[in-house]
Image (tube, rainbow, N blue to C red):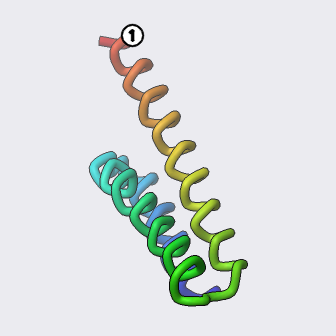
Amino acid sequence: GALAMAVGYYYWACAKAGAVDFFKATLVARPLFAILCFGLVGFAGAPWQLALFGITDILGAAWTTAALHAEQKVNQQVN
């Protein structure tokens, strides 16, 4: 939980600063983390609940992708 709070703060601070490159980087890291979670469950005998973290990160990456595309669309309309 403490790690999630720290990472959440990073996301909040980067969003406030408009650090788009940070969010683009998460589009690679989050699916990789999900694959790692699924691999640990499938091959290393980790508890199945760990897969829920992977699923959550996949959903978060999809949301981030949609938000970045929406922002890009708005910026194109303004310019």
Above/below status of 2 relative to 28: below
Q: Is residue 6 left or right of residue 73?
A: right
Horizontal and vertical percent for residue 55?
62, 60
Please state, as top left, top right, bottom left or bottom right, where the C terminus lies in the image: top left
Above/below status of 64 relative to 44: above
Horizontal and vertical percent for residue 67?
50, 36
Q: What amino acid is labelled 1 in the image?
A: Gln
Q: Quadrant location of residue 57?
A: bottom right
Horizontal and vertical percent for residue 27?
39, 51
Give me the residue at 31% from left, 55% from top: 25
Horizontal and vertical percent for residue 36?
45, 74
Of residues 68 and 19, the one drawn nearer to the viewer in this rendering:
68
The residue positioned farthest toward the front in the image shown: 43
Give me the residue at 52% from left, 88% from top: 44
State whether residue 5 appears in this view.
no
Q: Secondary structure at mark 1?
A: helix
Q: State how many labels appear.
A: 1
Give me the residue at 64% from left, 86% from top: 1
Above/below status of 53 relative to 40: above
Q: Which residue is mark 1?
A: 77
Give me the residue at 39% from left, 64% from top: 32
Crowd class of label 1 (few under 14; some 14 to 19; many from 20; radius 10 Å): few
State whether residue 54 appears in this view.
yes
Of residues 10 and 30, the one drawn nearer to the viewer in this rendering:
30
